Amino acid sequence: MKIHAAIARSANDDFSIEEVDLNDPLDGQVRVKINACGICRSDLSALEGKETIQYPVVLGHEAAGTIAAVGKGVKHLKEGDSVVLSWTPACGTCPSCSRGKVHLCSGINMTTQGKGPLSQGGKGLDRFMGLGAFAEYVVVPEAMAIPIETKLQAHHACLIGCGVTTGFGAAVNTAAIRWGETVAVLGCGGVGLAAIQGARIAGAERIFAVDPIKERRQIALSVGATDALIPDDITQKIIAATSGGVDCAIECVGNTATMQDCFSMIRQGGRAVVVGLPAYTDLLSIPAIMLLAEKTLTGSIYGSTNPKVDFQKIASMGESGILQFEPLVDKTMAFSDINQGFQEMQEGRVARVVLTF
Ligand SMILES: [Zn+2]
Ligand SMILES: [Zn+2]
């Protein structure tokens, strides 16, 4: 079928919304009508040419939608079901999936190398993270469309597809924050604000939110941070305020200098968790001697969650208000305003712009 998708033809280019061809769902695939798609920092990073993708590309990987058609053999979805898209293919057979860690599925790829159901003029279009959800419809394997029952509106539910799950999960799963702990979250965009809420829900006693932008620090305080600080001399400030360092620091910027700060500001035996997406070529250096203080440095992808199980739980927490979605979305815009949305995200004044269809 013919649909409209936002195509980026080269790095740092504007999107143009164009007519493209979308194949019908094959066996085990579903067609999803996109209702809302957030602009995630990883989309920005991809557009800025920092990630391994091919142009032309359709970005967008944080989406909520409705099942519009199902291919043969689809077992768990039917037309009309509400879904949130997941960017893990959860293949079920790779070593990670076999161990129950579907967030580490070896099928996760930023690029589809132009293969798959989307094309224009007979040429395949790349779909970022296997989704390419800045489009009216996507066709994906059944495992990438997670059914959820929720009263959350689409412009909130879509955040479960990336930002909220990534941040919340990094705090409660990867960092496994325990009650009474001290936590620092560096970077208070959509992911950082979700990490702060994860820390609050896990029972952290003190949560330092670190961000250069005043508005973001204010939102951080409103969703559970106890202290809000600017990044200048942040390691010294945090160490002084906690008598030796926080139990856990979570990096939500994707910057190697901030990652070093995280590692330096944790106490002996503390955990530093990197969530932000660095450029593909970035290298990180840390003082090796600090490892002997039994400090842990780890990354976190997709909040170490299992979307099939956890998306519904996260939606339910959003519905009950334990996990606040409203403060995470600064703006909703029409799909046709995608370039303006990216510009506002790039300027950094907003945590999240969500496009609605
Ligand atoms: Zn994302
Ligand atoms: Zn797998």
Image (cartoon, helix red, strand yellow):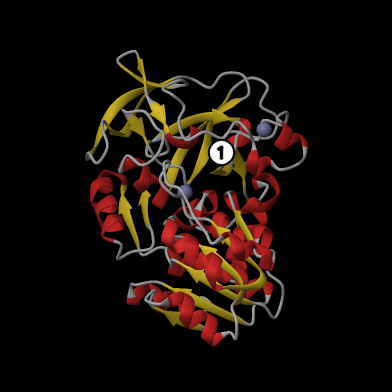
Give left or right: position of 89 versus 115: right
- Residue at position x 56%, y 38% in the image: 80
- Name the kind of residue labelled 1 in the image: Gly
- Residue at position x 38%, y 36% in the image: 136
Q: Quadrant of the C terminus?
A: top left
Give left or right: position of 173 versus 1: right
Q: Residues within 10 Å of mark 1 (few under 14, many from 20)?
A: few
Residue 54 horizontal/vertical position (percent): 36, 28
Q: How many marks?
A: 1
Q: Quadrant of residue 202?
A: bottom right
Residue 357 visible at all: no
Q: Quadrant of the N terminus?
A: top left
Above or below residue 319? Residue 117 is above
Residue 247 horizontal/vertical position (percent): 64, 74
- The front one of 234 and 316 is 234
Residue 300 visible at all: yes
